[in-house]
Image (cartoon, rainbow, N blue to C red):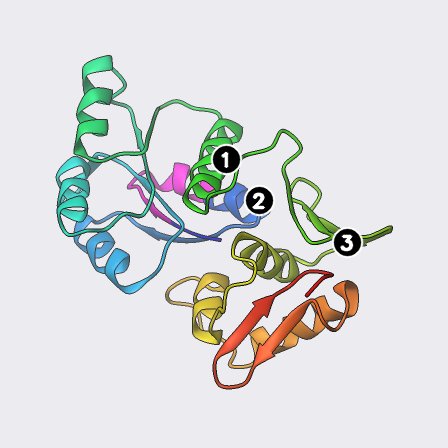
Amino acid sequence: MKLLLVEDNTLLVAELVKQLKQAGYVTDVTDKAAEADYLIKETNYDCVILDIGLPDGNGLLLLQNWRNQGVNTPVIMLTARSQWHEKVEGFNAGADDYLGKPFHTQELLARINALINRAHGKASTPTKELSFEGVTLDEGQQSVSVGEQHFELTAMEFRLLKIFLMSPKKLLSKAQLTDKLYQFDDEKESNVVEVYVTHLRKKLGKTAIETRRGQGYIFHGLKQ
């Protein structure tokens, strides 16, 4: 899953990116409204964390423009402006959630998870598990259960499997998967998807992930 963090507090950004990475998220970061506007149109984010006060603009106006242009990516406003009327302004601008500073990172993570699940038509569960056709991903432990077997996952395996579990039975192109696995300006390895699909098949079974040549991959779980 991939996030966009629009925030100009460098100390907060450093800590948040660290925590988000541990939770299995890939995060692009900018402190500029103009760059955020460019990134949202170039990348398919699962959620945006947006501050209001930015060096080159107002986060509320940026969000209003996105909504007017048809951008429906879930957005959490993360700001020190936490009076009730300021929250109303945020929701009226198109925010899906609003969290005032200071805040606890675990609360932010829970809100992100809830928004992403809702966007994919899934209910958030107390156990932080995603399941489909005999495959259960434990997001807290970053591990997977396949029938009676239990496997630990590397960070990349976890990210890739979560993407598949959020969109089972759907054709996902190599470009879509690669985009979700890397930050915007990272140097992307050309065969990373193939490599980690192979790794996952060793744990889930050869038929869990179907390859459509020239098109992409479909996650079936243990049943087809």
Question: Given the image, on which type of amino acid does mark 1 rest?
Answer: Leu
Q: Secondary structure at mark 1?
A: helix
CB under 8 Å between callouts 2 and 1?
yes
Q: Secondary structure at mark 2?
A: loop
Estimate the spatial distance between the alpha carbons at disc 2 and disc 1, rounded to whole Å: 8 Å
Work out whether mark 2 precedes mark 1 in sequence or the reverse, and give the earlier one. 2
Q: Is residue 25 above or below residue 41?
A: above
Left or right: residue 158 versus residue 18 is: right
Q: Which residue is mark 1?
A: 109
Question: Given the image, on which type of amino acid does mark 3 rest?
Answer: Glu
- Write the residue at 69% across / 59% down: 154
Work out whether mark 3 precedes mark 2 in sequence or the reverse, and give the earlier one. 2
Judging depth in this view, the residue of 2 and 130 nearest the camera is 130
Q: Which residue is mark 2?
A: 23
Q: Quadrant of residue 186?
A: bottom left
- Write the residue at 43% across / 68% down: 176
Circle 1: is it few (<14), some (14-19), or many (20+) Cα within 10 Å?
some
Work out whether mark 1 precedes mark 3 in sequence or the reverse, and give the earlier one. 1
Q: Secondary structure at mark 3?
A: strand
x and y percentages locating residue 25 in the rendered image: 51, 50
Estimate the spatial distance between the alpha carbons at disc 1 and disc 3, rounded to whole Å: 22 Å
Q: Which residue is mark 3?
A: 152
Quarter of the figure with the C terminus: bottom right
Which stretch is magenta?
Answer: 4-16
Question: Given the image, on which type of amino acid does mark 2 rest?
Answer: Ala
Estimate the spatial distance between the alpha carbons at disc 3 and disc 2, rounded to whole Å: 15 Å
Q: Is residue 19 above or below residue 1?
A: above
Left or right: residue 33 versus residue 2 is: left
Check residue 6 for magenta coloring. yes
- Write the residue at 57% across / 73% down: 193
Residue placed furthest toward the front: 224
